[in-house]
Image (tube, helix red, strand yellow):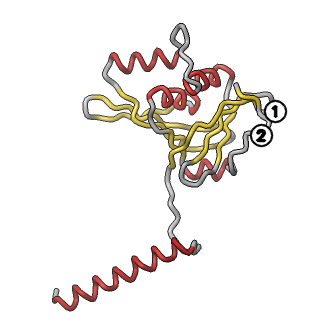
Amino acid sequence: MSTLSRMSLLAVCVLLLQGAVGARERGDPAAPKVTGPQEVDVVAVMLDPRTQQPVVIMEGRRDKRSLTMAIGLAEANGIAVPLQGVKPPRPLTHDLIMTLFDRLHVSLKRVVITDLRDDIYYALVTLGATGSEMTLDARPSDAIALAIRAKVPVLVEDRVFDKAGGGAVEPGNRERI
């Protein structure tokens, strides 16, 4: 390829990149949307005032959308205890699992809430050991409880936010657990 052709190709690439960056900065609808899972903060475990059912509230770090997931009372306890920094006198189930991971030299790498179908959330946990990884199906509440204990990211696929209709986090008058 001649020097002139390379320079022309480089100029076209620069113009395309400038256009894409400019579109993003202007908020153009044509600007590429960031997709895929985003990390969330587990904001709180509360009682929904309408249903009196425990819920876990998460907020996306990228776009601040919220996800409120109904969970059982035992699951709420499994998430709320480490979230509040409480050390129970005896290990809870998730504490036992973390101890097993430690003794077996297995680490929890990440948790991804992957889907919402028929009002049921789905999640995957990724474990690492001796240079390899394994991904397992898990209940999201268990995955979140483990992630908090292991201090690893909880990720939520964008489609889950879309299906759940996640808006901004508004804990309002919900009672914390």
Q: Quadrant of residue 21?
A: bottom left
Establish if 120 lies above or below 129: below
Report the front residue among 112 and 84: 84
Disc 2 secondary structure class: loop
Q: Quadrant of the N terminus?
A: bottom left
As shown in the figure, which amino acid type bears the numbered disc 2? Gly
Point out the residue furthest to the front here: 85
Q: Earlier in the sequence, mark 1 or mark 2?
A: 1
159 left or right of 104? right
Frontmost of labels 1 and 2 is 2
Q: Do labels 1 and 2 touch, CB within 8 Å?
A: yes
Q: Residue at x 51, y 49 (%)?
A: 38
Q: Position of residue 12 (x, y in %)?
A: 34, 85
Q: Which residue is mark 1?
A: 49
**Residue at (33%, 35%) from the top-left corner?**
133
- 14 vs 120, left or right, is left
Label 2: how many Cα within 10 Å (few below 14, some 14–19, many 20+): few
